Image (tube, rainbow, N blue to C red):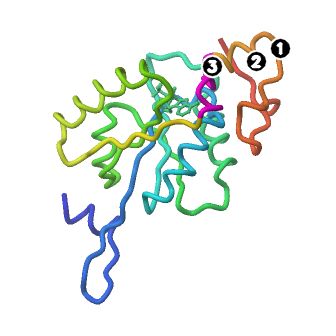
Amino acid sequence: MLFAIELRNGVVANNILIMKKIAVFPGSFDPFTVGHEEIVKRALSLFDGIIIAVGANALKKNYFSLDDRKDMITKTFKGDARVSVDHFEGLTVDYCKRVGASYILRGLRTSSDFEYERAIAQVNRQLISEIDTVFLLTKPDHTPVNSTIIRDIIRSGGDASQFVPSAVNLKDYKGQD
Ligand code: ADP
């Protein structure tokens, strides 16, 4: 297993295997926001590659379809080979293992985010100790940016464009309750 991971995410230079640092940024991204975009952009100085992985939970009803959520993210990072977009079902740590990522990236806005994220990160580490979670604090003006509130604005016919990346035109997507 380790060998397979090394082949996928390592490069050999002067006979020394250099492991690439890959992080998975998992989330619902319903929709992807400027807050999510900023976390990924800042994390690119820490990791060689980031996989933005949309959680596809068959039991969870999302407003935007999986394809639309992936499309928004693809448009946001178009042209940056360090960022890829995928989706997964099941446990995030199992997905990380499958793609050879040693880090989970998460964003923090408030103390309640912290408490929620702390429990998940600690349980994840108990499940697979080789995978660590890295948190980045949101920049102050993104603290109130929240996918739930953005969905409410859209449902009520408001203009939520300032809360999503500039590459995303919300008119291209039709949400469904
Ligand atoms: P999930 O359902 O997994 O919480 P979200 O799409 O809501 O998915 O969030 C994905 C990650 O992005 C989480 O770590 C969340 O705390 C973080 N996040 C959400 N909004 C912001 C924001 N405005 N600034 C920074 N991080 C954020």
The first of marks 3 and 1 along the sequence is 3
- Write the residue at 62% across / 43% down: 73
What whole-number distance in Å separates the C-alpha atoms at marks 3 and 1? Answer: 15 Å
- Write the residue at 58% across / 37% down: 139
**Secondary structure under badge 1?**
loop
What whole-number distance in Å separates the C-alpha atoms at marks 3 and 2? Answer: 10 Å
Q: Look at the image and say whether residue 146 sits in the magenta stretch.
A: yes
Residue 142 image position (x, y, % from top left): 62, 31
For label 3, count other residues whose C-alpha is less than 10 Å away and answer few (under 14), some (14-19) or many (20+). some
The reply to whether callout 2 and callout 1 are in contact (CB within 8 Å) is yes
Res. 36 mark? none
Q: Amino acid at mark 2?
A: Ile
Task: Check the image and name the residue furthest to the bottom.
Answer: 14
Q: Is mark 1 within 8 Å of ligand 1?
A: no
Q: Foreground mark, 3 or 1?
A: 1
The reply to whether callout 3 and callout 2 are in contact (CB within 8 Å) is yes
The first of marks 3 and 2 along the sequence is 3
Number of marks in the rendered image:
3
Res. 157 mark? 1
Q: Amino acid at mark 1?
A: Gly
Location of residue 93 by image quarter: top left
Res. 154 mark? 2
Magenta stretch, residue numbers? 140-148
Residue 64 image position (x, y, % from top left): 64, 25
For label 1, count other residues whose C-alpha is less than 10 Å away and answer few (under 14), some (14-19) or many (20+). few
Q: Amino acid at mark 3?
A: Tyr
Left or right? Give the position of 88 relative to 74.
Answer: left
**Secondary structure under badge 3?**
loop
Q: Look at the image and say whether residue 172 sits in the magenta stretch.
A: no
Res. 63 mark? 3
Residue 45 image position (x, y, % from top left): 49, 59
